[in-house]
């Protein structure tokens, strides 16, 4: 286990990186402030993402929060002290993006408050599993601010109608409503969240790494390229995937299970 970012007042890590074989967990670790995003948050998250992203042994990544909340958004104390300049918000977008472009599945496990920047990093993950006590929302407009690049990502996740309401109203919703509108993939009782995350991890571990990597890369382009441009990127991905031993092994297995002779 690595510690990312030391809190000088408490001598503990603001983020923990926990490795367990092919699974890497990035755990937000300031439960006393509901894992709020303080002045060091962007660089801490980028360092943690780099740690798990560059480790060749890790195939699936979890993003979780210590304690009773996932992430309550911006640390207002740091903001009030003048420790969060406008540039901080720009850097945060790259921290969110690090989960989005990582060539491994990233699963967010959400409990308690998942607000503001907490929801922004969650929607940058590939899937979101929520405990039934989760409360999600983007309160920025109520605070005379802008909810970051969720204005870009959220419509891609849940469609414009639901996204626009959450963005413009600043209202919070519960886990059941988040599931209804497609914001989270599943809701489970709080006590079952850890086991549910493990189940999702196992599903992704059963899929060959190469197909996951290229499929995620392609889906990231889905809203940004026209058909011909996307087809060109798809053709490149097919060439890369079919050249791998993983694909060739899967093809041989497919033939063998159907009784075809390999020399036919």
Image (cartoon, rainbow, N blue to C red):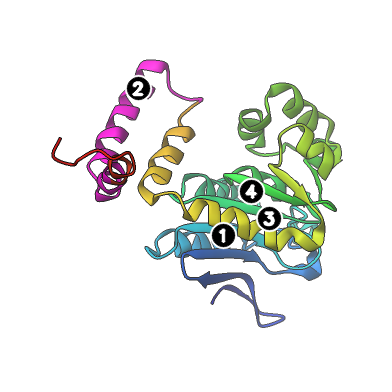
Q: Is 241 inside the magenta-drawn segment?
A: yes
Q: CA distance from mark 2 to mark 4?
A: 29 Å
Say which mark, if any, is on residue 11: none
Q: CA distance from mark 3 to mark 4?
A: 11 Å
Left/right placement of residue 137 relative to residue 257 reads right
For image coordinates 63% across by 33% down, the residue present is 157
Q: Earlier in the sequence, mark 2 or mark 4?
A: 4
Number of marks: 4
Q: Are the two marked residues, 3 and 1, in contact with CB atoms closer than 8 angstroms?
A: no
| Percent x, y of residue 151 | 66, 32
| Percent x, y of residue 203 | 54, 51
Q: Earlier in the sequence, mark 3 or mark 4?
A: 3
Disc 3: which residue: 109
Q: Earlier in the sequence, mark 1 or mark 4?
A: 1
Disc 4: which residue: 121
Disc 2: which residue: 231
């Amino acid at each position: 286990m690595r510690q990312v970012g030391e809190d000088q007042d408490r001598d503990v890590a603001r983020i923990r990186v926990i490795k367990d074989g092919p699974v890497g967990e990035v755990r937000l670790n300031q439960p006393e402030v509901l894992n709020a995003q303080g002045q060091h948050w962007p660089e801490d998250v980028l360092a943690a993402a780099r740690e798990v992203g560059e480790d060749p042994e890790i195939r699936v990544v979890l993003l979780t929060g210590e304690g009773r909340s996932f992430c309550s958004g911006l640390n207002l104390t740091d903001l009030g002290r003048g420790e969060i300049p406008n540039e901080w918000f720009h850097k945060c977008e790259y921290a969110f993006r690090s989960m989005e472009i990582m060539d491994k599945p990233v699963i967010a496990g959400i409990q308690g408050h998942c607000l503001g920047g907490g929801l922004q990093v969650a929607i940058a993950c590939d899937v979101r599993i929520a405990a039934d006590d989760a409360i999600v929302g983007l309160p920025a407009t109520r605070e005379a601010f802008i909810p970051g690049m969720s204005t870009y990502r959220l419509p891609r996740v849940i469609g414009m109608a639901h996204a626009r309401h959450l963005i413009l109203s600043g209202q919070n919703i519960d886990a059941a409503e988040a599931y209804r509108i497609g914001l989270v993939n599943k809701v489970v009782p709080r006590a079952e969240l850890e086991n549910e995350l493990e189940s999702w991890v196992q599903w992704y571990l059963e899929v060959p790494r190469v197909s996951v990597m290229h499929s995620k890369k392609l889906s990231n382009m889905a809203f940004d390229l026209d058909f011909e441009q996307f087809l060109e990127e798809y053709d490149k991905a097919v060439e890369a995937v079919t050249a791998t031993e993983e694909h060739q092994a899967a093809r041989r297995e497919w033939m063998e299970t159907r009784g075809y002779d390999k020399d036919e």
